[in-house]
């Protein structure tokens, strides 16, 4: 790209042009026909902001809190895997950028930098995203490692105990290039035998992750440390109620970026019912499809405390390392500010459902 990217779409195009096809497709792809992948953003496009006028918006703030952490904008960085596919500094660069933006980095179990290194380098709060293994001892050890490193929350992904079929990865025979490994993993991903139609990662997950995961495991996870547990992967209101009953402090309304069950609903479409079901028992976050500051305002209006962005951070990382991630977050901050001002909202507390037409 000849010009500096000015929005998230520009950053994705720059990343696509500069990355190997296997790496770009891994980040960008969805399950099967990628219907949910596309719908995650299109659903935001269908919503309309019914703005108010003649309100004093001369002084504006995006400051809010998530699980007691003050953040400077209602956007956190979602967990995504294998950041060193994008840039050699990997998750360390992403975490530093999140801290510079005054927000939270969520580190994936499938990180290419060790959790200890990421937390030490960050300078800001880091949450740890967890997958549950059939081997509960290995799972406990991973939680203990995250706690010892200084992570501030455990984010339990609950929609990936069986791996979705991402056909781009299958066609590309996805694997980690030589010299890269998942530093927090139990076992060696590349040594797990693959079935026909599986990527290397799919074979690993289907072999080692526990498909018997249930709500009793949420209670067990809550018992392992004093860290709050966030349940990520909720699209049904009843699951939000169950999350609260079993000790979770927050849920992420998420369909795994359209990478698991194709034709699952867009997250913004189910957010209002989940927020209603949660009442005041849970904090609600949402991910999937956020590409504009106006999308963030819409999500807050429909009940989210904050949104989580995954791919946008990766596009910034792939384009310009830590500086690219910083710029992606700065772009969203500017766009949220403009959207809030034009909606007549001087703070995030003033964003409510009446804005949605």
Image: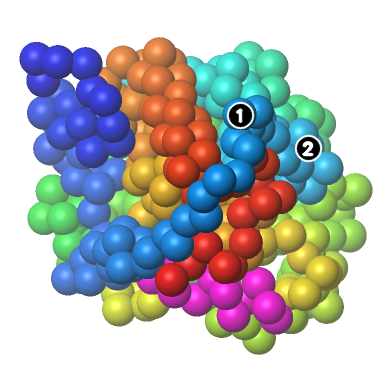
Image coordinates for residue 26, horizontal then vertical, percent:
26, 46
Q: Is residue 246 left or right of residue 28?
A: right
Q: Residue at x 77, y 75 (%)?
A: 279
Q: Residue at x 31, y 68 (%)?
A: 46
Magenta run includes residue 165: no
Q: Which mark is residue 58?
A: 1
Q: Which quadrant of the figure contains the N terminus?
A: top left
Q: Nearer the viewer, residue 202 or 260?
A: 260
Image coordinates for residue 328, horizontal then vertical, percent:
39, 28
**Mark positioned earlier in the residue sequence (1 or 2):** 1
Residue 245 visible, this orientation:
yes
Q: Which class describes the residues within 10 Å of circle 1: few (<14), some (14-19), or many (20+)?
A: few
Q: Nearer the viewer, residue 215 or 317?
A: 317
Asked if 190 appears above or below 355 in the picture, the reply is above
Q: Residue at x 17, y 62 (%)?
A: 167
Magenta run includes residue 276: yes
Q: Which residues are magenta?
A: 266-277
Report, in whole angstroms, how far the alpha carbon at label 1 lies from the one at label 2: 26 Å
Magenta part, dominant SS:
helix
Residue 283, picture quadrant: bottom right
Callout 1–callout 2 Cβ contact below 8 Å = no
Residue at the bottom extreme?
238
Residue hosting label 2: 69
Residue 205 visible, this orientation:
no
Image coordinates for residue 79, horizontal then vertical, percent:
51, 44
Image coordinates for residue 140, horizontal then vertical, percent:
76, 51
Q: Residue at x 75, y 28 (%)?
A: 149
Q: Nearer the viewer, residue 242 or 166?
A: 242
Q: Which quadrant of the figure contains the C terminus?
A: bottom left
């Amino acid at each position: 790209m000849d010009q500096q990217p000015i929005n998230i779409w520009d950053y994705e195009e720059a990343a696509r042009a500069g990355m190997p096809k296997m790496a770009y497709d891994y980040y960008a792809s969805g399950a099967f026909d990628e219907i949910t992948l596309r719908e995650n953003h299109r659903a935001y496009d269908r919503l309309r902001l019914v703005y108010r006028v003649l309100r004093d918006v001369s002084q504006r703030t995006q400051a809010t809190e998530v699980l007691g952490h003050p953040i400077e904008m209602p956007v956190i960085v979602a967990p995504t895997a294998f950041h060193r596919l994008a840039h050699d500094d990997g998750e360390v660069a992403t975490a530093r950028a999140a801290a510079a933006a005054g927000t939270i980095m969520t580190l994936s179990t499938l990180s290419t930098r060790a959790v200890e290194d990421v937390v030490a380098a960050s300078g800001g709060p880091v949450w740890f995203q967890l997958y549950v293994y059939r081997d509960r001892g290995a799972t406990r050890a991973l939680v203990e490692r995250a706690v010892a490193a200084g992570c501030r929350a455990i984010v339990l992904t609950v929609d990936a105990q069986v791996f979705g079929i991402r056909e781009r990865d299958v066609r590309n025979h996805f694997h980690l290039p030589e010299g890269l490994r998942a530093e927090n993993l139990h076992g060696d991903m590349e040594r797990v035998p693959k079935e026909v139609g599986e990527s290397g990662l799919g074979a690993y997950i289907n072999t080692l992750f526990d498909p018997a995961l249930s709500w009793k495991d949420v209670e067990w996870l809550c018992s392992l440390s004093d860290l709050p547990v966030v349940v990520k992967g909720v699209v049904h209101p009843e699951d939000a109620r169950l999350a609260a009953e079993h000790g979770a402090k927050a849920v992420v309304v998420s369909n795994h970026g359209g990478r698991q069950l194709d034709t699952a609903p867009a997250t913004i479409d189910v957010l209002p019912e989940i927020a209603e079901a949660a009442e005041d028992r849970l904090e609600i976050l949402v991910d999937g499809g956020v590409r504009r500051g106006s999308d963030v305002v819409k999500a807050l209006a429909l009940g989210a405390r904050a949104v989580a962005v995954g791919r946008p951070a990766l596009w910034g990382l792939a384009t310009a390392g830590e500086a690219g991630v910083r710029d992606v977050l700065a772009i969203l901050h500017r766009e949220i500010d403009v959207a809030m001002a034009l909606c007549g909202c001087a703070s995030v507390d003033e964003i409510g459902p009446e804005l949605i037409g």
